[in-house]
Image (cartoon, rainbow, N blue to C red):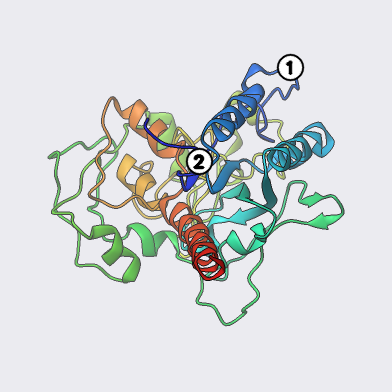
Amino acid sequence: MGLKKGELDLVAGGPPCQGFSINAPKRSADDDRNSLFLEFLRFVDEFEPKAVLIENVPGLVSFEGGGTLQAILLALGHHGYSADVKILYAPHFGVPQTRWRTVIIGIRGDQADPLRAFPEPVRNAPLRVNFTSNFEGKNIVALPTNLELPSFVSVRDAIDDLPALANGEIGKERKNYRSGPQNDFQVAMRNGSDGVLNHEAPRLGEINIKRMSFIPPGGNWTDIPEDLLPRGMRRARRSDHTKRYGRVAPDGLASTILTKCDPHWGAYFHYEQDRCFTVREAARIQTFPDSYRFVGSRVEQYEQVGNAVPSLLAAAIGRSIRGVLEELRKHAKKVS
């Protein structure tokens, strides 16, 4: 690549999450995907960047009783990085969904405090921690320190200007907006765009349309009459599967956008239109700008959206790391 060791500012990556995820059906220390952290560290050793960023799911904290996370931090230290870890909540950074990420940041050398490289929340949002958040005796969830921050971006704030669609409606490839931008979020998402792409409604079968007719905004499978429930859910406790067959509350946060907007996976029914989220609506909730075009089959497009780190969260982390690196450069110039 023509780079000398130490020239590169940042090596960033997120090895496949499935081996660590608290939602995965099987979590095993023998999962070959987990060894990809060693491959990532090989890149770090090769380029010796000024900073290292690793992102993963919250389940990383509890995997092997915290041993895997501890090993990663020790390995970064062995390679010459001061490193630390926090769990970030995407709504604190303007993302309209309940999404958590474990973020590890390492800064090369022993003079830098890696905690200063983590971004500060810019919004308040309701949260519920349903995973292990303690590591080495401390809670590593990053929380706002300023209670006067503006409130979170809601689902309605995020997608209400997109054109209405019926169940299964395809329409033109590039559609007109439903209205002018209604808030700063929509203004930002529409910057550089001259229309709405990837906005086609998946076709739900008749049984799911019937089920959806009983579900109010904010409701879920427990609102469906028992005889219409999938057979496997008829004996489920009402406290189980609380997101399945959910219709999102317009003034709340969306469920985590996964690689399918399937009603059996979560709350992906539109709050006022009787259909599931389109790829574009999922992308808005992931804070991709409207100018970003997704390609491939619709299944592949949903996967591209769901596998991504939300753009606004990624940008916040990047700006924070850049700020620390710029301070270190200024300090180095003064010393020299």
Q: Quadrant of residue 213?
A: top left
Residue type at tag 2: Val
Crowd around label 1: few <14 · some 14–19 · many ≥20 (10 Å): few
Residue type at tag 1: Asp
Residue 5 placement (x, y as % from top left): 50, 38
Tag of residue 30: 1
Element under disc 2 = strand
Q: Is residue 212 left or right of residue 63?
A: left
Q: Quadrant of residue 18?
A: top right
Cβ atoms under marks 2 and 1 closer than 8 Å: no
* Residue with the mark numbered 2: 11
Q: Quadrant of residue 75?
A: top right
Element under disc 1 = loop
Q: Which is more N-terminal, label 1 or label 2?
A: 2
Q: Nearer the viewer, residue 175 or 165?
A: 175
Q: Nearer the viewer, residue 238 or 144?
A: 144
Q: Nearer the viewer, residue 125 or 88?
A: 88
Q: Residue at x 22, y 53 (%)?
A: 163
